[in-house]
Image: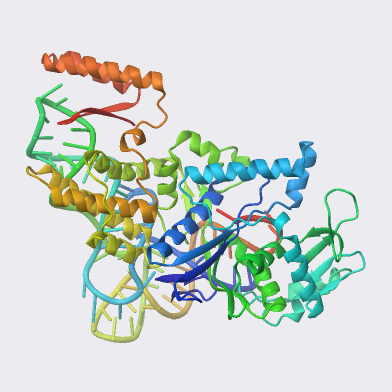
Amino acid sequence: MHIFDSVQKTKRKFTPLEEGKVTLYVCGPTVYDDAHLGHAKSALVFDLLTRVLEANGYTVTYARNITDIDDKIIKKAIEQKKDIKEITDFYTDAFHTEMQAIGVKRPTLEPKATQSLEAMYALVQQLLDKGHAYQIADGDVYFDTASDSKYLSLSHRIQNEEDKQERVESSSFKRNSADFALWKSVKDDSVTFDSPFGAGRPGWHLECSAMIEKHLAYKDREFAIDIHGGGADLLFPHHENEAAQTRCATNHALANYWMHNGFVNIDGEKMSKSLGNSFFLKDALKEYDGEVLRFYLLSTHYRSDFNFNTEDLMHSKKRLDRLYRLKKRLFGVAQNEEDTAFSKALLETLNDDMNVSTALALIDDMISSANETLDTAGKHKQLKRETMANLAYIEKVLGFGLKNPFEYFQFGVDGATKEQIDALIAKRNEAKKAKDFSLSDSIRDEILAFNVNLMDTPQGTFWEKI
RNA sequence: GGUGCCAUCGCCAAGUGGUAAGGCCGCAGCCUGCAAAGCUGCUAUCCCCAGUUCAAAUCUGGGUGGCACCUCCA
């Protein structure tokens, strides 16, 4: 398997630190609001990565944190006059529900910031002891970026004159302008934690390093973990700072490979509150099947920026429809999980830095040739068995095609409407039997008014929501 | 201003030195009572200019046009 390392900026062969095992850490959500399509994209990308790694035989330990200490959470709690935990529990549950709806499996570990405070204190203490951090008069603890010769090596940034100027101007608290807070002292009685450095709250970069040390890190290796992932925006400053903390506090670097997924834009615009509800996952899920969203969001390369729009989404859905129509044709055929030439080829292309586009082309080809054979007369026992295996592999590795194919095509149609449609179909079939085609066609138009397409097949008449 | 990324058919999108995958849309045909679905066939020389090479969408230089990060952010 090869993955693109966004720090070395090159595709590298993946070699785990420990044979057969992979440790993966991805920055998860701050639970103060609903998940948007960008959260979905990131979760989907690393869900896919996990599946591909597992398909290669690795045992993956995947940790994705829940940030439940944050100024925005506190702000929301005050605004809504609610308990902090009430807010964070609510959005954590919502996150889980929505991720499940788009087929994202739960990570192995989901550490919460509130449960990792001891690990954070330990990390800050190590940094203080080693002279990589300092505490100022009002209690804040800062990371001393000047003490880390490798600072900015991750994001390849260069400290320029402007920064140095700024440094002089705002030199009242921090030694260098780039220094970031490890611990923020809080004097009021809002939300504080009693640390060895006084009452306050952790800096936002600290959490990830601490959790990795506590839950994932190899103690005796050059790197704490194999792969660290997140959104493209996190490379700087978040990951840069994480890497600096870990490098300076412990005897190892943070991660061997860094992976960053591209951004989701909506109709060419960067996501923002001004776009209203259009970017919340929960709202998209009201309109579209979660698997359609999964398929669409994963249909282009994970590193590219993604322009979300409903027109492309519908076009993408038509591609997934083909998969489900083949499933309909094979409905009732026994499950099968044998290896096939197709599954081998599929994994091979996914192993190339998760080339989903080529994988989809392989799937389209597989579907076409299966349909072609099925269209011809005769028994197709062997083909059906293999195709079932191919479909099962697609389900396992890509997470597409998990639903009942008939239900898939009935998304968003309520029970009463279904009964009406079924009744109309029965009426139409009688008209057809009597060769009253003008009546049967007018019934079809009636059904079409529900946005429902009819298909007459040897197995009977089926319908699909358009 | 600093750093970096991108530009491939009407739309979405692979391919990164060996002569342009795939999907949507469109056209033609087979199938169908007619449709739908399915199948078959057809549809681009890769933003512009110059260079390197036997060979470039793929490498180099220049230009034009987008975008991202540098502040909370997936």
Query: Which residue occupies the foreground of this view, A224 or A36?
Result: A224
Q: Is residue A264 left or right of residue A378?
A: right
The answer, for residue A245, to whether it is visible in the render is: yes
Residue A433: x, y in percent?
Answer: 12, 17
> How many numbered marks have been drawn onto this rendered protein structure?
0
The answer, for residue A279, to whether it is visible in the render is: no
Q: Residue at x 66, y 48 (%)?
A: A31
Query: Which residue occupies the foreground of this view, A411 or A444?
Result: A411
Quarter in which the C terminus of chain A is drawn: top left
Quarter in which the N terminus of chain A is drawn: bottom left
Residue A108: x, y in percent?
Answer: 54, 58
Residue A122: x, y in percent?
Answer: 76, 69
- Image quadrant where residue A150 sits: bottom right
Residue closest to the far right: A137
Q: Residue at x 35, y 51 (%)?
A: A395
For residue A349, above or below residue A392: below
Q: Is residue A117 left or right of residue A106?
A: right
